[in-house]
Image (cartoon, rainbow, N blue to C red):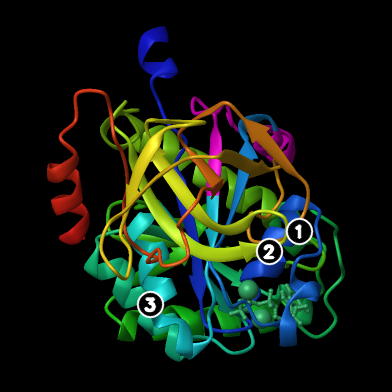
Amino acid sequence: SGRSEYNLRSPICCIMGHVDTGKTKLLDCIRGTNVQEGEAGGITQQIGATYFPAENIRKRTKELKADANLKVPGLLVIDTPGHESFASLRSRGSGLCDMAILVVDIMHRLERQTVESLNLLKMRNTNFVIALNKVDRLYGWKACDNASIVKAMKQQSRDVQSEFRMRLTQVVTEFKEQGINTELYYKNRDMGKGTFSIVPASAISGEGIPDLLLLLVQWTAKTMAERLTYSNEVQCTVLEVKVVEGHGTTIDVILVNGVLRDGDQIVVCGMQGPIVTSIRSLLTPDAMKELRVKGSYEHHKEIKAVQGIKITAQGLEHAITGTSLYVVGPDDDMEGIKEAVKGD
Ligand code: GTP
Ligand code: MG
Ligand code: NA
């Protein structure tokens, strides 16, 4: 019914996996950006967030001629670092998401932080799809820019197809060793019932990207009623604390539910106790732009979930990442909120 459709929030999808499997590059491919090449050493060191409006996803999945009619406003994707030293950021990202993309490099198969990420997802019972990335590195691969993987695979020589099958089998076996059943997504009749889908992809030439997006959309359609019903109660997590030229110390947050307004009194967890302050500005990057990359920001009077937001306010210097942000309403008990913050 119309009513429920307007009451859905965007799903949050976390992208995880071992260092250099191509997580950021995959997002660059979908966004049409070049974030990865701007990273120091090509390594992601922060959690990022990008908002994809439903309209963009619909365009990108058109050629699959499936019903990609998203009944949610969009999709928020959280990028995480794969380097071993950022385990806490992976944990934070996976703790926030409704579903995940686990990225595996087809040449390297399962690696240490692939398994670590997998264990986080298992622990939280989070559904995920596997992006088997870098198929363009199969010897003799013929690029079919942005094509569905089924179509792209048909264009390949027998040798490429047989190398692909061999590597896929190895990956499936390694997942099995981790207690996880997997199957190529277009052969998987058991999706969501214990067999996880594999989407072969390339972040460089874009094969498999439509398929990956379509799976996210289909998953959303299945689970929205239970999980994605919008709630007015503010649910908001601090991702990063950052000094930004011209803005002072800011916090990047993910607003999962509710509305934030310019001027709202907020409480966040600080190193020396709860920080009580007021929102000075609510900023978002443009759609399909990465929150963690400095760019132009759009100012808002209010923002409804789901969104990745940069908040400027006084006194945020000692804010602690990974904790909740609370909004103090007119009838709220400040002491109670401060206690809740301390317990975070
Ligand atoms: P961290 O965030 O540091 O964990 O790495 P990541 O998983 O985000 O990987 P990233 O996007 O930084 O890509 C790592 C390297 O692999 C870069 O040099 C990319 O250009 C390259 N790469 C990523 N995806 C592909 C792909 O599909 N094909 C090929 N050939 N190279 C890729
Ligand atoms: Mg990265
Ligand atoms: Na990298």
| Mark 1 vs ligand 1: CB below 8 Å | yes
Numbered circle sitting on residue 26: 2
Q: Judge whether residue 173 can be spotted in this image.
A: no
Estimate the spatial distance between the alpha carbons at disc 2 and disc 3, rounded to whole Å: 22 Å
Q: Position of residue 314 (x, y in %)?
A: 50, 51
The residue labelled by disc 1 is: 29
Question: Of marks 2 and 3, which one's residue comes earlier in the chain?
Answer: 2
Q: Residue at 37% x, 82% y: name it.
A: 116
Dot 1 alpha-carbon crowd within 10 angstroms: few under 14, some 14 to 19, many 20 or more: some
| Mark 2 vs ligand 1: CB below 8 Å | yes
Does the magenta-highlighted stretch encompass residue 63? yes
Numbered circle sitting on residue 88: 3
Q: Amino acid at mark 2?
A: Leu
Q: Amino acid at mark 1?
A: Cys
The magenta-colored residue range is 56-76
The residue nearer to you, when weighing 340 against 155, is 340
Q: Marks 2 and 1: CB-CB under 8 Å?
A: yes
